[in-house]
Every structure is written in structure tokens, then in C-alpha cells.
């Protein structure tokens, strides 16, 4: 009787601790990438999910993780990947499912929690995650939600110069699987866990030393430029649409941003994608304003336009474009977004066919600098980003 009661109480305590760890993982996963990215969360949620998955039968543990990942992905990406319930549901599946697969692989290979895991088994999960990132790089969602893209620390990001972004993913995820090896071996003393702890600590220390040394020894003898970033005028949402500003209001916002940037002695004023929503009839006036304001403030301006096709010259398709204007008020380049987001943008925007802009621009002090630019999703295509040819 006593043993049965004790076992029942121990089982209840185990379930409570598992549920708390799962809850912590769900919160961490929600604040990993997407709307509320907190870099440290990428180191926490995989361990919590791994701990839960290995502590339950495969069907229950993995299906629970899948449900949480789908729900959290829907919540943190809603409205970012598009408008409408169906688009966001599809997006949640596309963003959650690839990073669920590594947990399935780990559970099938490593088995239950509590087994004496070898160091080699700790490589399975990070290798699976890095492989997913590599395979996703061939698709149009390559960096969206990737572990490596959530890390903002400039030291650890230097690892990408050696092994690409997949190396960052590997190191972050390995932290969780090494943590599970330590949990499985822990018996109240440090001796059984010393080997996995020291191996991972040594690797992480080497990564941080490499990143720190690379930054410390990097040559900074070349001239530098100051860049001001802005999003353009703030638009109020009216129902399912955003308000439409007049060309005069857009120009006033542009002028205010340029004056603020000039006050901070910026050399380049950079606007975000679709910073200004205008129609094709006002585009000429808007571009002339950009040229005039660039000349008045003696700065380079890269402005993003969303141009509505009101005269049906593009068969109803809008333009997602950017103008690069030099400090003399001359247009260096007009570039159309080349890689449109599947479903969300395809069929609504003109697809550009040009390679990424790479222009040498003379700055006010006489310095010649190369300026290349991509519009949002273009940056997910490494081949286009790596094209360094200049027109």
C-alpha cells in the first residue's frame, strides 16, 4: 500500500515537473523568432521540448509538441506573413513543421529519457536542425524562422564566416542535446557529466574566442558612412485596409525624415520596403521630391515605393520598387523586387527581372562607395545576394 501510494505521488510530481518544463518551452518558442524575437529563447525551447518528448510515449510527446509549435507559430507570425486566416494557417504549418521533424528523428534514434546517452547521440538533433536549414535554403522560406537568424550577438555570428549560418544553428541546438545528456547522466555528482559539459563548454569557448578575435583584429582603416533608417509615414488601419495618404502628406513625411537624418549627419537615408504607398499618377511627383530633398540635404536616399496600378498599365499589378538617389539628386537605380512571396505577393505585384543593384556612388566628401540593396525577400536568395557584378 505504502509503495503504491509513494509511486503514485512520485508519478504526479513527475507529470507536474514535465508540464512546467513544457509550459516554459511553449513560452520560449513563442518568443523565438517572429513578432517577439528574444535571442536567448532559441537556447531554451529546444531543451524543454526535447525533455518532454523523451519523457513520454512517442505518439503523445511528439503530437503535443506539434500542436504547440503550430499554435505558437500562428500566434507569433499572424499578420506578418500575410492577411487572412487561411494564409496565416498555411504559414504556421510551413514554419513549424520543418523544425518539428528533428524532434521526431531524435526521439526515434535516442529513445526515452533516462537512458545513458553517449556523446555521439547529442549530435543528432543539432545535425538534423542544421540539415533542415540547409534544405530550406533551396526554398523561398530559407531564413524565415531559422535559429541562426534569431541570434543578434555579433561575436557568435562570426561563426558564419567559417561554416555558414548552419554552424550557428548547430551550436545553439547542441546546447539542448548536451543538456539532455547531462540530465540522463546526473546522479547528484559532477563526475558523470564532466565529459559532456567540458566538451560543449570548450567548443562554445572556441567559437566565442574566434568571434571576438575576428572582430578585434578586423581592419577599420577604410572610410565609414553613417546610415539613418526609417519606416516612412505611419498609417492607420481602417478595417481590412490601411489609410491612403495624399502625395503631399507623403512628401512632407519624406522631408521630415531627411531633415532628422541630416541633423544626425547621416550620409545615407534608408527607407524600408513599401515605405510610401502611392498611385502611378503621383509617382513622378514623388520621385522628383526624393531627388530635390536628397540634393537639399546633401545625402543619398534609398526610398521604397508601393505603386498602385490605377491606369492598368501593368494589368492591375502593383510595383514594389526602390529608387537610389545620389547626393546630387540624380537617380542611380530603380529596382523592382525580384523574388515575390509565394501566394501573398505573387499575382499582386510586378516581378522584377534584374540582378541586385550594385552601384558606385560618390558621397558628399568625395568618397566613392558601392551600394547594393535587396528588398526583403530578395535577401533569402543567396545566389542573388552574392552577385557582386557592377553595372
Image (cartoon, rainbow, N blue to C red):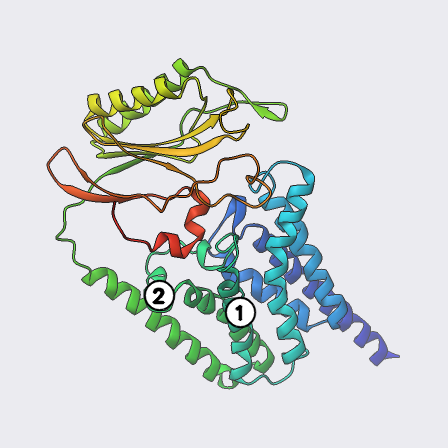
Q: Is residue 189 visible?
A: no
Percent across and percent down for residue 293 are 26, 21
Look at the numbered disc 2 and give the secondary structure of its residue. Answer: helix
User: Which residue bears the numbered disc 2?
Assistant: 159
For the point 60% across and 43% down, the residue is 343
User: Which residue bears the numbered disc 1?
Assistant: 176
Horizontal placement of 113 versus 189: left or right?
right
Q: CA distance from mark 2 to mark 1?
A: 19 Å
Give the mark nearest the N terminus, 2 or 1. Answer: 2
For the point 10% across and 37% down, the residue is 366
Horizontal placement of 128 versus 222: left or right?
right
Percent across and percent down for residue 242 are 55, 24
Look at the numbered disc 1 and give the secondary structure of its residue. Answer: helix
Percent across and percent down for residue 5 are 84, 74
For the point 81% across and 72% down, the residue is 8
Return the mark for residue 251: none
Residue in front for this viewpoint, 287 or 376: 287
Q: Quadrant of residue 103?
A: bottom right
Horizontal placement of 108 versus 363: left or right?
right
Residue located farthest toward the left when viewing the structure as drawn: 366
Percent across and percent down for residue 98 are 60, 61
Q: Quadrant of residue 75?
A: top right
Question: Relative to 7, does residue 369 appear above or below in the rendering?
Answer: above
Q: Residues within 10 Å of mark 2 (few under 14, many from 20)?
A: many
Quadrant where the C terminus sits is top left
Horizontal placement of 316 versus 56: left or right?
left
Residue in front for this viewpoint, 317 or 6: 317
Residue in front for this viewpoint, 205 or 316: 316
Amino acid at each position: 500500500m505504502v509503495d503504491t501510494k509513494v509511486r503514485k505521488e512520485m508519478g504526479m510530481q513527475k507529470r507536474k515537473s514535465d508540464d512546467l518544463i513544457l509550459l516554459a518551452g511553449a513560452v520560449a518558442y513563442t518568443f523565438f523568432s517572429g513578432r517577439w524575437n528574444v535571442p536567448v529563447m532559441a537556447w531554451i525551447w529546444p531543451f524543454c521540448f526535447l525533455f518532454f518528448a523523451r519523457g513520454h510515449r512517442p505518439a503523445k510527446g511528439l503530437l503535443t509538441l506539434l500542436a504547440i509549435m503550430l499554435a505558437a507559430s500562428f500566434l507569433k507570425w499572424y499578420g506578418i506573413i500575410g492577411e487572412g486566416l487561411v494564409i496565416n494557417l498555411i504559414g504556421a504549418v510551413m514554419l513549424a513543421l520543418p523544425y518539428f521533424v528533428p524532434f521526431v528523428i531524435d526521439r526515434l534514434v535516442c529513445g526515452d529519457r533516462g537512458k545513458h546517452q553517449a556523446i555521439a547521440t547529442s549530435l543528432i538533433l543539432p545535425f538534423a536542425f542544421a540539415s533542415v536549414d540547409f534544405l530550406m535554403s533551396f526554398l523561398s522560406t530559407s531564413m524565415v524562422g531559422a535559429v541562426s537568424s534569431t541570434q543578434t550577438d555579433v561575436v557568435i555570428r562570426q561563426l558564419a564566416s567559417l561554416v555558414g549560418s548552419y554552424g550557428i544553428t548547430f551550436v545553439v541546438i547542441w546546447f539542448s542535446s548536451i543538456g539532455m545528456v547531462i540530465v540522463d547522466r546526473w546522479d547528484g555528482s559532477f563526475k558523470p557529466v564532466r565529459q559532456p559539459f567540458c566538451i560543449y563548454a570548450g567548443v562554445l569557448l572556441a567559437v566565442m574566442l574566434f568571434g571576438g578575435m575576428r572582430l578585434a583584429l578586423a581592419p577599420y582603416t577604410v572610410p565609414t558612412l553613417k546610415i539613418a533608417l526609417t519606416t516612412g509615414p505611419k498609417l492607420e488601419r481602417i478595417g481590412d485596409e490601411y489609410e491612403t495618404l495624399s502625395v503631399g502628406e507623403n512628401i512632407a513625411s519624406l522631408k521630415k525624415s531627411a531633415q532628422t537624418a541630416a541633423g544626425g549627419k547621416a550620409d545615407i537615408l534608408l527607407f524600408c520596403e513599401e515605405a510610401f504607398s502611392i498611385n502611378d499618377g503621383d509617382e513622378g511627383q514623388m520621385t522628383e521630391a526624393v531627388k530635390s530633398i536628397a540634393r537639399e540635404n546633401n545625402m543619398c536616399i534609398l526610398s521604397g515605393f508601393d505603386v498602385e496600378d490605377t491606369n492598368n498599365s501593368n494589368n492591375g499589378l502593383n510595383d514594389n520598387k526602390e529608387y537610389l538617389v545620389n547626393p546630387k539628386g540624380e537617380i542611380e537605380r530603380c529596382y523592382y523586387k525580384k523574388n515575390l512571396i509565394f501566394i501573398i505577393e505573387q499575382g499582386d505585384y510586378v516581378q522584377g527581372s534584374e540582378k541586385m543593384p550594385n552601384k558606385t556612388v560618390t558621397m558628399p566628401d568625395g568618397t566613392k562607395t558601392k551600394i547594393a540593396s535587396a528588398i526583403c525577400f530578395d535577401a533569402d536568395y543567396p545566389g542573388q545576394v552574392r552577385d557582386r557584378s557592377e553595372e
